[in-house]
Image (tube, rainbow, N blue to C red):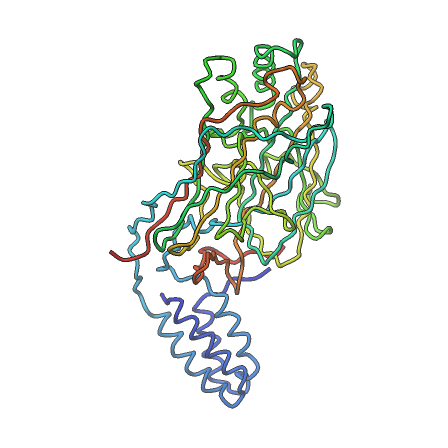
Amino acid sequence: MDYDDGERDRWVRLADDGSKDPSFASEVAKRLAAELRRACNRQTTRTPDSYLYHPTHKFLARVLDLDVEPLPDDSTIPPTAGVPLTRTGSQPIPIRIPFDCLITGVWGYARGANDTGDPSVEVLPSITAGASDNLDLFSVRWGLNGDTWYSTNGNDELMCPASVSVGTQTFPRPMAWLVGRAQTLNVLFRNISNAFFEDLPPDNPGRAGFRLAEAAIVFGALKLEGP
Amino acid sequence: MIEPRTLEQCASLAEELAANPAEAVHQLPLLRKWLRDLPPPRAQLLSRPEWNVASLWTNVAAFENVQVNEERIEIVRCQRDLWLRGCVATVIPAFQPGEDPTSLEELITQVVSARSIINFSSRQFRQLFEMSLRLDGDLGFFSRGQSGEVMIGAEGATGTCERAAKMDWALTTNQHIEVRIRNNSLWIGGSLLDFGGIPIRAIFVAFWGVEQRGGYGMMQGGREPLLGGGSLGERP
């Protein structure tokens, strides 16, 4: 059996009309019975099972040389105001959508900096991260057109680690997000590596966390516009 | 719980009403509801199984500076009608200073040994805490089957960035989820290790969801919404 959205909407409207007008109810019931039975008896499907949904287009939001933002610290003199862990002072990275598309998934990754020349510093990212692709070393939040942000506790928007916001390239977080041409996705990033070492004494060089050579979020999309 | 209806059931009801005009007046609203709540057509663009867990919103409970054995509660409010489809958690442990707290090499040694203890069986450090969930403050979901709620290890209730723990909760605006956590790192390592537990800098428990309109979750991004596939969300 098969039907499409347009048909279902029409059936719902018909049932609505019949509900509002009792003199019409009987005729509506007969029409609906005939149409629904015809839909039940149909055997065709419109989309082959082999239709591919792999996202061809990939929209990238990326920051290079992402440094940490200081966390609030009362132990220093004077106290460090810092930026709370669930906030950021960074500017959003915009992605201007070039065509009508269906975003089918989102994933991310981060890379530690390996250009410091100090092997002790360079090994820190790999031994610190607990998530695949270093996703817990940075936090992220994305939004649409600058006014709707999609990470929240229900009252406020939050920055949260990428390891709870996105998937990996092998296992993307599934999405079914219809976005139109000329709309703008905005993505905020924050390096949270210093949060892992906040209990270290001030003179330990690891306390400041480490720079990320790259942090990126990728949205996989299917183009919906015709050629 | 909402019971899914099929097209065949809708057709049967419509035929009953067509044969009984007096009933049609009273039962058409029911037929309308069944039609509205039909599963999406199989030929829809989103009929593949992956869409069953597609989501856009990330509703997060964030806990900061959780000490060993400390218990904490955070509330996640639904700011709109939401269909929650997955649960993910991650932990930022607070690595403690070692014997030589000024040395980077000592820090690395300490981090590696701490990692070998705390991350040996679960990703994203989730075994450092346990949790329970309640809806609207009174309906809990983890138990031994009898009275009294229990907390379970986070790796038994949440997923990772690669695979979210599946959920199928249809919640309305202003309903709230109470997330209760406890830092249970003291129990890791057992009696053989003089471990003492590890403070947690932050725990994030996230619920992936889609805004719900009508009978099904829809993703919207400024244009007409698309339907998500899969069954109706169970109303807990």
Q: Nearer the viewer, residue B64 or B236?
A: B64
Q: Position of residue B54 (x, y in %)?
A: 47, 49
Residue ranking furthest to the left: A227
Q: Nearer the viewer, residue B220 or A51?
A: B220
Which residue is drawn at the image coordinates 51% and 74% (left, top)?
Answer: B32
- Say whether residue A209 is left or right of residue A58: right
| Vertical relation: A62 (above or below) B190 | below
| Vertical relation: A196 (above or below) B98 | below
Image quadrant in which you'd find residue A39: bottom left
Residue ranking furthest to the front: A78
Q: Position of residue A20 (x, y in %)?
A: 54, 83
Q: Quadrant of the N terminus of chain A?
A: bottom left
Which residue is drawn at the image coordinates 55% and 54% (left, top)?
Answer: B83
Image quadrant in which you'd find residue B2: bottom right
Q: Nearer the viewer, residue B95 or B188?
A: B95
Q: Position of residue A80 (x, y in %)?
A: 69, 29
